[in-house]
Amino acid sequence: MISPFLIDMAYIVAAVLFVFGLKMLSKADTARRGNQISALGMLIALVATLLYGGLDYTYILAGLVIGGGVGLIGAKTVAMTGMPEMVALFNGTGGVASLLVGWAEFHQSSTDIAAGTLTAFSSFTLFSIFLASVIGGLTFTGSVVAWGKLSGKLPGRPLLFPGQQIFNVLLLAGVLAAGIAFSLVGDAADPLMMAKYDLYLVIVVIGLILGVLAVIGIGGADMPVVIALLNSYSGLAACATGFIIVNKVLIVSGALVGASGLILTGIMCKAMNRSLANVLFSGFGSTSSGAGKKNEGEARVITAEDAYLVLEAAGSVVFVPGYGMAVAQAQHAVRELGDMLEENGCEVKYAIHPVAGRMPGHMNVLLAEANVPYEQLVEPDDVNPIIETVDVCMVIGANDVVNPAAREDEDSPIYGMPIIDADLARTTFVLKRSLGAGYAGIGNPLFFRDNTRMLLGDAKDSVSTLVAEFKQD
């Protein structure tokens, strides 16, 4: 057993490491080290907690073995294309863990009151149990639905029914009212004591239902925002759990995750030029794929051999990666092509839209895995002012984030969304399997522009063919 003072000091050290690690995650060149520092902080917090007196190590060790085994298998076997789904499940497990801690603490306190060792519930503790349970339950089921949409187990389009928004509001109001009633102090002589048990079950059930209804009506194009928001929810649930069990480091870490998740959600919404309320309640993506102006013209298809001739003469190339690159697992081939272009005297950049892919930072993770230099990664605000001077813009599996309709078509559902102006480059190559719509279900006029050439087929195969052409030169 270790003294409470040393445990508190360890918690302070862990909290400081969390803050520094989180700060370092904001930059690509320090993100990996920031992750390691945060992991060290978590290790310190775990060790300090395990040294606390009165714990049953049998269940703790069993949990560590099972949880560590599942995590190890997941880390080794889940492909990079499956990372968004894995992140969604991680958020969900964090939520259900908070719910279970709240449930266990409520049960234990109820048992103590029945045995006479505890005279009454603390109103503050009850309210913390309410928050941990309802937010944790919402996060769990919402994350499961997000996983289903991301993995294709559920339709990516919004699933709506008449009056759904009103029903959601009524459910939310109902659970808040139940939470207030649940949080009222009650002692062993309180005739309404038994009602608290039933009320708690009602709160848990409503929280679980809210999670489903909150995410089921959101379209696939908004998944990066949803993932960031669910991550925030999991942190808020953990923070509430920290107040329940009076654990300082859990309060701090939960608050950090909750706050950073909300900030990231705001960044995602800004990148789409939409409010959070619009994302949560608009049902974006439920419109037909023909929404907006009808695309006119004919797509010009090019072969990899002809594309090579253009790239060989280019002085500047900007890659715009999207989810299609992840599906094709083409990131290593793209990096190899970029290296060859540089050897040929070409300036190479990788323009990454904040909502490209299926989760925040999805493209950054893929390119980092392929060892693309951090200094070559640029944001839309960096590349758009110079895009007209770029010889070739290569769009690899991206669609909605380069759709000119967002800039030109007031009838388009994505009108006003900031995009990468790939259509303004001198020549634009689009690598896709077909001319089909993107995840938002909206046609893309970029495919039919005079300066656009479509390189159809698997992105990895197309890029590998370009690499082979350079090697033969």
Image (spheres, rainbow, N blue to C red):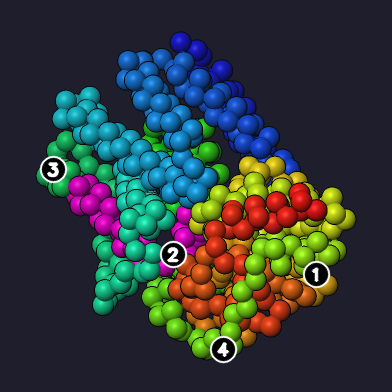
- The percent position of residue 102, horizontal first and vertical second, equals 32, 39
- The amino acid type, in three-letter code, at marker 4 is Glu
Residue at label 2? 220
Residue 251 vertical position relative to residue 8 in the rendered view, above or below = below
| The one of 455 and 82 positioned closer to us in this rendering | 455
Q: Find the distance from the CA under tag 2 to the CA under tag 4.
A: 26 Å
Which label was assigned to residue 279? none
**Residue that appears at 31% across and 69% down:** 159
Q: Find the distance from the CA under tag 4 to the CA under tag 1.
A: 25 Å
The residue at the far top in this view is 1
Residue at label 3? 194
Q: Comparing marks 2 and 3, which lies closer to the viewer?
A: 2
Question: Dot 2 lies on which element?
Answer: helix
- The amino acid type, in three-letter code, at marker 2 is Gly
- The percent position of residue 232, horizontal first and vertical second, equals 48, 51
Marks 4 and 1, the one that precedes in the sequence? 4
Residue 426 vertical position relative to residue 226 in the rendered view, above or below = below
The residue at the far front in this view is 472
Question: Dot 1 lies on which element?
Answer: loop
Marks 2 and 3, the one that precedes in the sequence? 3
Marks 2 and 1, the one that precedes in the sequence? 2
Q: Is residue 179 magenta?
A: no
- The percent position of residue 148, horizontal first and vertical second, equals 35, 54
Q: Find the distance from the CA under tag 1 to the CA under tag 3.
A: 73 Å
- The amino acid type, in three-letter code, at marker 1 is Asp
**Residue that appears at 16% across and 25% down:** 115
Marks 2 and 4, the one that precedes in the sequence? 2
**Residue that appears at 60% across and 33% down:** 38
- The amino acid type, in three-letter code, at marker 3 is Met
Residue at label 4? 296
Q: Comparing marks 3 and 4, which lies closer to the viewer?
A: 4
Looking at the rendering, the stretch of residues picked out in magenta corresponds to 199-227
